[in-house]
Amino acid sequence: MSGARFNHFDLKLIEPSFGSKLTDLIIDLDHLRKKKLGGSTHPLVFFQLKHIFHKLESIGSARIEGNNTTIAEYMETNLTDKKQFSEGIKEIRNIEKSMAFVEENIVNYPINRAIISEMHKMIVDDLLPPPHGEGDITPGQYRQVNLEISKSSHKPPEWLKVNDYMDELFDFINKEDSPKYDLIKTAMAHHRFVWVHPFRNGNGRTVRLFTYAMLVKAGFNVNVGRIINPTAVFCSNRNDYYRFLSDADNGTESGLLSWIEYVLKGLKEEIEKIDKLSDYDYLRKEILMPSISLSLEKKYITDLEAKILKRAVEHQVISASDVKSIFPGKADSEVSRQIRKLIDQKMLTQEKEGGRKYVLRFDNSYLLRSIIQLLGDKGFLPLRDDE
């Protein structure tokens, strides 16, 4: 925006006062980080939920940048064999693939320029550069032009200084500090990345992936029964996101503390909310059973299929003998045929390859539509299609 200016300040840790709300948030989040979830939800069911939330995280990150693809539109791409996608769909798919890359690599490698460059390449892959798309003509490379951020009074540093500022950022996040600073550093690093704006385009999507990587590395690990959805903090109210970022741009302690508190408060609320899904009693009663009923009501499934799927929800793991009573007087071959049909429709899956025990499947079938509606109704979605 006109009148935007650059204001240098050093990147250094901030110490919140002991009696502050921020200190309370840090203590609460550290408790959540160490908490043994011991969830009762079957790992195969939990993995499907994680897969769905990865998609929601990706949609949310793209939405902040103005992508208008709806949840329904993106989820429907799972249910078709379509090979060609719009720019909006490709942008979201890129973010989703990048999240998988983070999960596979970030624990074993430092967060450095090589990792960030790879993230950025994946984020902008096969997208047209502006003004026609959300790609970048120099993927993975720091910008060699000066730029301004739309609707911001902050002007990022000159391109010649980007490398030094990014090296400072990597030194900051990789310095061996007490674990009590992990979340302060995560929030500060998010702001600093946006403040530097190291790439020509795709900085917002990359910084939210960068934040996800820092949280995984800090021990908020999705592979031990937790789903983290940090973009939900930022996309639930974009105006708040930009306002708190702006407050921190001048580097004042009060502005930075407000930003950190905003991030950590949102993160705590998201983690506590989504952790409920690891409790199978809650998941069965509030999400899965109603979703089967809704799918039947909308004629995505037949009455017979609904009975089998409800049995799968009740038991978590079923075999043919568990559904035999649904087919009085029928041969075992008919029971097996119906189970095979649901496997082919991606509504059941084998617990183990080649085995004869089955678990509900919903992440890539028409049940997904109902699952998404129920998650929305229960407040688990940071954004809705009707917004």
Image (cartoon, rainbow, N blue to C red):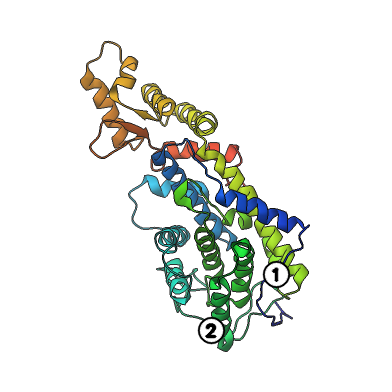
Q: Name the residue under label 1.
A: 14
Which image quarter: residue 162? bottom right
> Could you tell me the amino acid type at mark 2?
Asn
Task: Tell which of 269 and 346 is nearer to you.
Answer: 269
In this image, 108 relative to 60: left or right? Answer: left
For residue 142, say whether it is visible.
yes
Q: Please tell me whether residue 129 is drawn above or below residue 100 in the rendered image.
A: below
Q: Position of residue 111 (x, y in %)?
A: 48, 70
Q: Which residue is drawn at 69% across and 72% down?
A: 152
Task: Tell which of 255 and 25 is nearer to you.
Answer: 25
In this image, 252 relative to 217: left or right? Answer: right
Can you say which quadrant of the picture contains the N terminus? bottom right
Q: Where is residue 137 in the image (x, y as percent from the top left)?
A: 45, 78
Extreme top residue here? 329
Q: Mark 2 points at which residue?
A: 163
Q: Residue at x 47, y 35 (%)?
A: 40
Local packing at callout 1 (Cα closer than 10 Å; few below 14, some 14-19, many 20+) is some
